[in-house]
Image (spheres, helix red, strand yellow):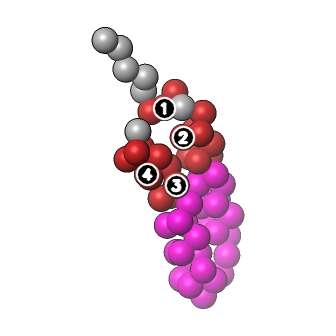
């Protein structure tokens, strides 16, 4: 029996790309923005692929 890898799922890869893009954007923000909204949006973006992996 063979299993597909999580990395083979297109939706998982799109979620990873989104997360990386969010991180790239937020690292350019000033400290206050990063400390308030930045942390929240990064955690939310990271959790998308984590939830896909958990459900997979």
How far apart marks 2 and 1 lie (CA) works out to: 7 Å
What residue did someone put label 4 on? 50
Label 2 belongs to which residue?
12
For residue 31, say whether it is visible. no
Tag 2 secondary structure: helix
Q: CA distance from mark 3 to mark 1?
A: 14 Å
Q: Looking at the rendered structure, which numbered label has been put on residue 7? A: 1
Q: Residue at x 49, y 67 (%)?
A: 43
Does label 2 or label 1 sit earlier along the sequence? 1
Quadrant, the C terminus: top left
Looking at the image, is mark 1 or mark 4 earlier in the sequence?
1
Location of residue 35 by image quarter = bottom right
In the image, residue 55 above or below residue 30: above
Q: Under tag 1, what secondary structure?
A: helix
On residue 48, the disc is 3
Spot occupied by residue 7 in the image (x, y as percentages of width and height): 48, 32
CB contact under 8 Å: marks 1 and 4: no
């Amino acid at each position: 029996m063979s299993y597909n890898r999580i990395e083979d799922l297109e939706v998982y890869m799109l979620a990873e790309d989104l997360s990386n893009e969010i991180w790239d954007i937020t690292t350019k923000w000033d400290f206050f923005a990063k400390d308030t909204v930045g942390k929240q949006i990064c955690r939310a973006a990271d959790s998308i692929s984590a939830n896909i992996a958990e459900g997979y």
